[in-house]
Structure formats: structure tokens, C-alpha cells
Image: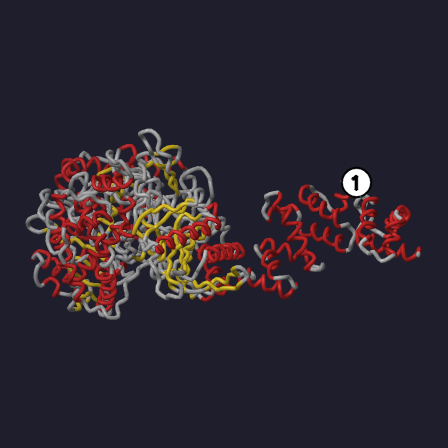
Amino acid sequence: MAWEAVIGLECHIQLRTRTKMFCECEVVFGDEANSHVCPTCLGLPGALPRLNAGAIRMALRLGLALGCDIRHESQFARKNYFYPDMPKNYQITQYDRPLFEHGTLPVVVEGEAREFALTRIHCEEDAGKSFHPERTGDRSRSRVEFNRAGTPLLELVTEPVLRSPADCAAFLVTLRRLVRALGISDADMEKGQLRCDANVSLRPEGASLLGVKTELKNLNSIKGVERGVAAEIERQRRALDSGERIVQATLLYDADHDKLAIMRTKEQAHDYRYFPDPDLPLLVVSEAELEQARASLPELPWRRVQRFVAQYGLPPYDAAVLGDSRELADYYEECAAGLDPKFVANWLMTEALRAVNERAWDVARWTAQVPAARMADFLGRVARKELPGPLAKQFIGWLADEAGGVDELLARHGVSVKGTAEDLRPIVKAVLDENPGPVAQYLAGKTVTMGFLVGQVMKKSGGQAVPTLAQQLLIEEMAARS
Amino acid sequence: MRIDRDEVRRIAELARLEIADDDAAAVAGQLSGVLDFVATLQQLDLDGCEPSTFAPADAPPREDVPGVRGLDPFAATAAAPESDEGYFVVPPVVENVNP
Amino acid sequence: MSRPLWKESAAAISARVRAGEITAVEAMDAGWDGPASLWEHDVHAVVHTDREARHAAAEAAPARGLLAGVPVLVKDNLCTVDYPTTCCSRILAGYHAPYDATVVRRLREAGAVIVGKGNMDEFAMGSSTEFSCYGPTRNPWDLSRVPGGSSGGPAAAVAYGLVPVALGSDTGGSVRQPAAFCGVYGLKPTYGRLSRYGLVAFGSSLDQVGIFARHAGDVATTFAALAGWDEYDATSRPAPAPDVSNWDAGVTGLRFGWPANLWANGVDGAIVDALERSANALERAGGTRVPMEFLPGEYAVAAYYLVATAEASSNLARFDGVRYGLRSSDATDVRSLYVRSRSEGFGPEVRRRILLGTYALSSGYYDAYYLQAQRARTRIRREYARAFESCDFLLLPAAPTLPFRVGEKVDDPLAMYLSDVFTIGANLAGTPGLSVPVGVTPEGLPTAVQLLGPQDGEGALLRAARAIEVNGDVARLPREHEVEASWPGKR
């Protein structure tokens, strides 16, 4: 039987506020254990929570960007369960009155534009961290610390509208791009700033009812989500094909071994005893606050990609690559100002991004090392044919690894560019003198010989000639001689 | 509303409390008595009564600015029954569940 | 010197400290050397103190402020950096909070000296101060009787003269009922007026810090020193607190509700008598009696126990043996650590209420119990609001009985719960209430009445209390002549 996969995602987005959700401790990644804690985030007796207004402003940006219905009076609730990294043994979250409902994320999957419907987005606090050592010897202890406890999170839940691992990956890439563009999260999955669980079920193709679902946890990279979901779809398909029933369960994905392990089945499910947190007032969002959030929205990434196509005539693929991050898109637009946008796009996508990858850099490192003004100066010279192509490609490396302007780099590497006709004409004449055979062939109509002649000019100039100019001069000189 | 001993055990498990088998019946009896009493609420006419909330909505919000009431790792773990290098130490987590 | 310092009001002490006539240390030692030497051993009002800590506090206290040099005992569920904070529970044995509760901080800023921590029912769950891991407090008026609860220690300490002012907490009457049993004033302010930051939570939407004193004016002064917005408590109210400086302005023109149907049966005759005498005193002072039918009803008790226990079940989840407090020695994994530590650490009444609250929130019962109770609160608030349309405050009993005997109700939770019937309404509605002592019965037991006001109605309550104080029976101390005779006080 042909099966169709039905997938819903639950994403946790760690907000990049300065302080925690309900106390004034700084949010710091990877410092000394319990060095950013206070009575509130340690859950000490008598301590009380206070909502971080900055976190809510960030949340509003996301809700507006995704076109969610915004609840003007939402409510915090306690989710009660015992776990050592949960200081109060309840988590402050939102339950039946979340801040946002509905909304969609526009995603391009394999070239096709899709809109994935969302169920809700709500605000909550993160837990601390437990460290479970390998069990060795007769004494085994876990260690717990709370620097992360209370970090603001947004939980985003999709409708069961994704159909494939590729959908999941594209969804997450797009979401990551969005929250980065909004400046509300660094969304690095390896650092846990973006986390994702997937609910997976299969049903006969064409059916409208949902099958029994399993929940997949521990998916800590986009590749991990893609592979984990693929593995679970395959596991369920095999089970269903051999007549087994799917048992509702939570599974852990082990990315290192590409394996799934059942963590618990539904019988062990929790009773979280949600109730409104009496320590916190209703979260009231005024029209003025919404208006302010709306005004603070940057151009949304998918709109920018559309604009790159329309305004600069870029192919959709190029527009998507350059629009991948706010940083790269800003950089592109700065470099392209006053130059041919397609020419700049080509250079950035091929040469600059290659240099980034070769060095295992990120875009931020590149833009710091080669600011847009420096890059634009360089690209301008290439466009005006003041720098020959092969040299230009070598030049990218110099820009990346060394300091100094274009002229400084040329001087440092002892390069005098044979850029002008005056520079090149003697070389061209010499090449024609030295190669009477190929010249005759060319004049007899064998035009491919031109490549050989240009090559000779390049060689003689020490690679510093601009090939198009060399070709132009060769044609001129031969015409003058014949 | 009668609560039986199994129900008492289910609630005790949620609350992480131990109820000795000998006590379960007595506790069930006491809880049943209280629940019979609070059942008067079911008969109450509460039309138009939304659930109460008490926190005021007009308090100025906390701005996203670090404060001064933090504790250092020593103070944070000073009252801990067991700690090590600024960490709290607990026995192993057997129920491998972190929802 | 004519009058011993331990009999003085907080107002008199702070005036003399500010004037440089006496020091905070002298004001404090008066209570310890005098009445405490006679009473404390039997009454057991104080659970944590030590001479060095309280002397250090007295010496550090500034000789200025509304409460300059006034010794204050605070209930053991308010966090203090200089004494343990244990809620009189084994699960917090030896726990030292690393911070002061906001009200404690404000006491110190006003010049007060924290002398120690008062006994209480474990986690404030009880009405008799019998459920303390340190043993019960007894009523200084009759040692065979309870002082009421849960703030029995602070109430008894003020009653016998250890301190002129003490702080308690009132979730369902835990300040007003012990104040009534011990013959002192006990104010539960409007919800949100006194910060809960640093008050170990029982029922968060009901809890309020309360004030004990032997004089209405001292209640007013302490309220003025403590009330006001606290940015660390999101449930505290930012609008300015009511001005109570006119506590001595009399009651001319004030109308008091007289819901006599409430004490038609089941209320002790001595208390009915106290109500009549108080009403007469108020009328003599220019107040107007407004007879009315008022029925907060038994359903209020039901709503109260559901809300309080549900919130408590969640608030007390943090006591798990991981970060502080008791850890069972025979835990082998985290689950058994939780279960053993909590079962060994919590007493039977606390365990019982956690179970009830857990049940009320659990899947399938939430709507019928917790949600229904929160809706009932809305109805109760409306009933109170309606009553206050025709009067400025209500006069009613604080408790239906005189202090009962130690051990009398320990095994009957429901009977204990029902003794809160007159006090819980104010907690459910978030409105203020004040217990006012009205003399002593021929058998030597204190009687009291309760005044309930609308939100922010503390001013009228204190004016009425003062009128009863002047026109009726003044609060006095148990066996005060004996203490005076045995006291070496020549200071």
C-alpha cells in the first residue's frame, strides 16, 4: 500500500534577550555553573517571577511576521512535573490562552512555494541543565546547574501539514532565517537555541484521517531532523506493511548511529495539572505595543528574496542564496549599489562564498574581514576590466586573508596590472610576430585559434592581462597588418 | 465523591509522596470527606462568573536590564544537601524522561 | 521610670529611640528579660533567635524611621538573612535564605529590629499552631488552649509582651484568628498591598502578610511602613496604598454592616456579647449600624480549600531535596529522592493538603473543582461588593469560638477548616480584615470581633478599631501584674 507521511513540528526558539524571562539574571551561554542565578530562577522559597517586557516585544515581532492571531490578554500557566533541572518543579508556560494562534510560514521546498499552517506560538521559560555521567563504579551522580533556567523561549507548533523530511528541513531553514532576520534569536541548533520535536504518523495515501503518531525528540540539527524523520517514516512503513500497529510513543533519535530508541509509551504519559499561574498578571498587549512592534519589523526574508528577483533580475535560486541571511542580503545590496547586480551576485555566490567555505568561516567573519566598501571597490575594478579574471580570483584570497585596500594588495604582491591598451599593445605585437602560423590559420577562418593567441598574451604578461582586452587588441592588430 | 485507595496512590505518585498501605484507606476516607463537602460548589449558580484573577494588570513591566540580586555559585549551592564545584548533585535519573 | 518598656506601644518606643532617650537594644531586652523570662518556656512563641544575632540587629538599626528601635518578631515563613527560615517544617530544617523578604527589608529600613522567627503551623497550614515541627505554641491566656493559627507564635509573642509588633501571614484567617484568640489586633491588608516577595507561598492568590500589635495605632504605623508597590512582586499593586494616618479620626458618619444572621447559631455567646459591645461602642462614637443579611455561605469554605490546596500543591513542589532542605538518606535515584524526602519532610496535614490540591488540579477534575472554585470567588467578590454599597465596613466574628483546647481538633481536618468560616471570605475577595480585641471573659479568655472592609478600606477599619479601643475594652496583657512584679526592670 502507498503511505503518506503526516508530520507536525514543535519548535523551541531561545530568545536573545539580555535577561531571563522572569528574573533579572543575565542570559549567558557556557559560563561557570550556577554563576547566573538568583532566588527566582533557582526556585528558592518565597521568590516570585517578573515578566521580561523585552522578551514579549521580541515575541510580537515573530507573531506579526507570521500573521498570527494575537491574543490581547493571554495568560501564563504552570505545567507541573518533577525533574531535577526544573527548579520549581513546575514550568511557567502558556496553556489554553497562548499569545498567538494560527498564522503561516511561507517556505520554498524544492523550488515549490508552500505555506505551512501554524497552530500556536506561546512564551515559556527554559529549564536548567542536567549532566548524566557515564555509569562507572558503584557510585553515580548527576550534576545540575541553572544558568539556563528561566531563559525565554517561544514554542511554535505547526499543524500536521508537513509531508516529508525535505518539508521539515525547508521549514526549519526558513524559520531560522526569519528569527535571525528579526533579530530575536541566534537559532543555532547545535547550541540548543533552536530545538525541534517532530510528530510523525502515516496514513494510506488519499486518506483524510490521521494515523497513530509518535513523537521524535533529540533532533539537534536540521540534518538530524531530516534523517530522524526519514528513519521514523521508514520504521512505521515497515511496521504497517507487515501488519503491525503503531504504538503511540516518544522516541529519541541518535544522530551518531542513525537509530531510534523508544523513550516511553503513552501509558507513562504525564498529568501536568496546568492551571493559571497566580503569581503573574494577565499578559496584556496594547494596540500601541503592537504598532511599535510592527514598525520595528525589518523586511521579511521571503519578501526580500522576491524583491531580489523583481528588482535585480536575479534567478530565484540566486535570490534565495543571497537572501539566506539578513547579513548576507544586506552585504549584497551594499556591494551591488552602483554596479551590475547580476555581476555582483555571481561574484558573491561563486568566489566569495567559496572563499568562506574553504576557510570554514561564517558570513559574519567574511563581512568583518571584507567590508562591503572594500569588496565594492574590488568588484568595480573587475567590472571596469581593470583587473584580469584569473588575477581577480586569486585576489579574493588576498582580500580574505590580508589587510589593506586593493592598491595596497597589488603593491604588496608586486603586481602591476597590464590593464590598459598601452600596456598590452607591445605584448600583442610580439605574440603576432612570434606566431605567424596560428595568425595565418585565424585569418583563414579558423577562429578557435584566437584562444591560443589570447593564451600566449596572458602568458607573456605574466597572467596580468585582461583577456577580453587582449582579444580586442589581437583583432585590431591583425586587421591593421592584413 | 468517593476516593479509593488506588486513586490515592495515583495522586500520591503525581505529588511525589509516599502513602503507606496501612494509611491509604484512612487518607482516602479523609479526602472523600473533604470532597463531599466541597461538592456543594457543583450546585452553585455561577452564571456570568468568570474565574477570578488577582494580579493587577497596571504594574509597569520589567525592562530587559540585568539586576543586582544574583547569587554567586557558592551562595547558590550553600544550602544544597550535596554539591560539587558549584553544581547541585543528585542521584541518577532513572526515569529517562524530560518532557 | 513608671511604665515598663515591654508594655509600651511601638509608637512610644520609637519616639523615645528617636529622641535618644533609650536604645534599640534596651527596647528589645525589655521583652526578653521581662515577659519572655516568665512566658516563653511555656508559650513557645519563638522558634529561631539568638542573643548575638538580635543584638547585632539592634545595634545596627538606625535611630530613625517610623519604627525606630521597635523589636519585631516575624513569622517563620518570611525570609530573613539573619535567622533560619523553615516554615516550621522538617523539610526546611536549618535552611537559611540568602535574601530578606521585601517586608523584612522595609521593617529594617523603618528602623525596626528583627528579634527572631515566630512559631507557626507547618507551611501556614492549620488554625492552632499545633502542626509545627518544633512543637505547639500555647495561648498565654490559658496554657491548655491553642493560640490559634497558623501565625500563633507571633500572635502569642505580641500578647504576652515580648514585642509590640509582629508579622504573620494570612491565607484564610491565619492572622485574624490567632489575633482574636490571643487578644491582640491582627490586620490582613488588601491583596497586593504588602509585598509577598520572600513570603514562602502557600496559596499565592490568597496569601497576604499581616500585622499584629496591641494598639490600633501601631497597626496603622506598621502598615504605613510596609505598604506599597514592590517591583519584585508582580501581584503587588502600583497605585499608592491607602493613607491610614487618620486612624484616630473617629467614626462619625461611618456606617457599619450588622449581619446578625451570621451568628444566629453556632457562635459562642461570649463572642455575640463582644459583637454587641463593639457595636454599642461604635454607635456611641458616632457610627451608624446598618442591619443586613449577609451570607458568604459554606460554599466559600469549599472554594477556599480547593484554591488554597491546589495552589499549595504546586507551590510546595519545589521542596524536593535537590537545592535546599531535607534530603532523605536512603534515596537511590531521583524519583526515590523526591518521594522519600517529601514524605519524611512534610507533616501529615501538609501531605493531606498537597494530595487534595493535586487531586483538584488533576486531569478530569480541574473544571469541576479548581475552575469552579475560582468562579465561585468571583461570586463572593460580588457579594462583598454589594454589601459594601450600603456600609463602610462589616462587623462580624473573627472566629466562631473562643480558643479551643490543645488537641481538640487535630484529628478532624474538616472541623478545623470550618473554624475559618468568617475569615476566608476576605482572602477569597482580596479585601482587608482586622481582628479587634474586645476584653476578656470572666474565665480569662480574650474575645474579639472582626471588621471587614472593601478593597483599600484599611483606613476605616483602623478608625473603627480605635473607636472600640477608646470606647470599649482596651487590649491588655495576660497576668501582666505578675510579670511586672517579677521583672527587675529599673531601666
The residue that disc 1 covers is: A414
Amino acid at circle 1:
Gly
Q: Residues within 10 Å of mark 1 (few under 14, many from 20)?
A: few
Residue C58 position, x and y percent, is 31, 37
- Compared to residue A37, the image places residue C289 above or below, namely below
Front residue of A57/A145: it is A145
Residue B58 position, x and y percent, is 38, 61
Quarter of the view holding residue A287: bottom left
Q: In the displayed image of the protein, which residue is found farthest to the top?
A: A137
Residue B72 relative to residue C488: left or right:
right
Quarter of the view holding residue C477: top left
User: What is the quadrant of the N terminus of chain C in the image?
Assistant: top left
Residue A399 position, x and y percent, is 69, 45
For label 1, the SS is: loop
Q: Which coloring applies here?
A: secondary structure
Residue drawn at the location 68% of the way across and 58% of the way down: A336
Residue drawn at the location 89% of the way across and 53% of the way down: A440
User: What is the quadrant of the C terminus of chain C in the image?
Assistant: top left
